[in-house]
Image: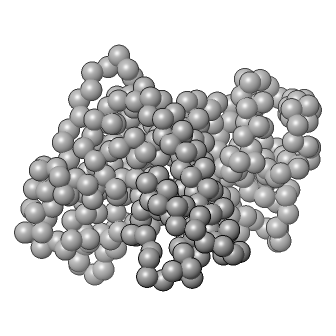
Amino acid sequence: MVIVGIDAHKRSHTAVAVDEVGRKLGQHTTGTTSEDHLALLAWAEQFGAERLWAVEDCRHLSRRLERDLLGAGEPIVRVPTKLMARERNSARSYGKSDPIDALAVARAAVREPDLPKAQLDGPARTVRLLIDHREHLVAERTRVINRLRWHLHELDPGNEPPARTLWRPKHLTAVSAQLDQLDGVVARLARALVERCRQLTEQIHVLDDELEPLVKHLAPALLDLCGCSTLTAAKILGETADVRRFRSRHAFARHNGTAPLPVWSSNHARHRLSRTGNRQLNTAIHRIAITQARHHEPARQLLQRRRNGGKNKAESIRILKRRLSDVVYQALRADARPSAPSRLKAA
């Protein structure tokens, strides 16, 4: 078995081939087009037919490479950056270069046998692109509203719209009517910001209408979970990619950062909040937990039992999030098998 480590960049990819014990066999640098990837595959054939490609897990740079290699029937694993850095630090060579990084990727793949396997993008990729674009539009609209509020404050400090309302059509119409009666550069800029806010709101609504049927089709069991809205389900789908790539619910909890970290001291064993893992996915589960803490009776009973047992509020929420991670995992597994009955447990 030959392992080919790839250090991917925007305009070039560097490959280093190693044998089963990590000895370097050769290196090659190529471009990033499909023709370059075919040439890279032809170069790797000199080391034998049995090979494994190891790519640093930075899919914005390696997605096209992975797609071309998977299309050619090549097996690929993704190497987390932290494993690559650890291997580079333990090597005999000094410094940092593309060949050194590619060699570290290959040796990390030799050392770690259970790395996640790459696969072609599915519907979850579409959901992630849509939800990420929606978040960017919402952030841009917030910046526009902040600038608009400063202009309105300058024009009339005593007549400002209520907080968190300037994205609503009726409030924008009222502000526009007031600005039509004013002259000057500030009023003109404020009118332009009102129109920009209207445009962004319409684009956000279009994305909402596109996401709702798509998420409903892909994750009906996830949407049945109390506190999980369409946007939260879309974020979970997009960040998880494919739940079948996780070995168990424990691996999924480790990925999303809800698995507690042991911090034993002397004879006292305890756990603390983990700040590792996918924080976007962790935030989505946190939203579900906060909603269930207010409106879902089983979750409220769980929190009350933990508080009665001596846990504080933050520790109780952490325990609820760990339970919810398992429920979300079960829902995603059920949605991955549409023919299988949904057997979701309450939090």
Query: Is the image coloured rainbow, by chain, by secondary structure, or in one colour?
Result: one colour
- Residue 343 lies left or right of residue 132; in this view the side is left
Residue 6 locus on image (x, y percent): 78, 47
The residue under the point 12% across, 73% down is: 310
Residue 46 at least partly seen? no
* Image vertical order of residue 3 relative to residue 314, above or below: above
The residue under the point 62% across, 68% down is: 190
Residue 306 at least partly seen? yes
The residue under the point 73% across, 36% down is: 66
Point out the residue furthest to the front here.
181
- Quarter the N terminus occupies: top right
- Residue 241 lies left or right of residue 333; in this view the side is right
Residue 170 locus on image (x, y percent): 43, 54
165 or 107: nearer the eye? 165
Residue 319 locus on image (x, y percent): 25, 60
The residue under the point 9% across, 62% down is: 305
Q: How many marks?
A: 0
130 or 32: nearer the eye? 130
* Image vertical order of residue 301 relative to residue 128, above or below: below
Residue 137 locus on image (x, y percent): 59, 53
* Image vertical order of residue 262 relative to residue 123, above or below: below
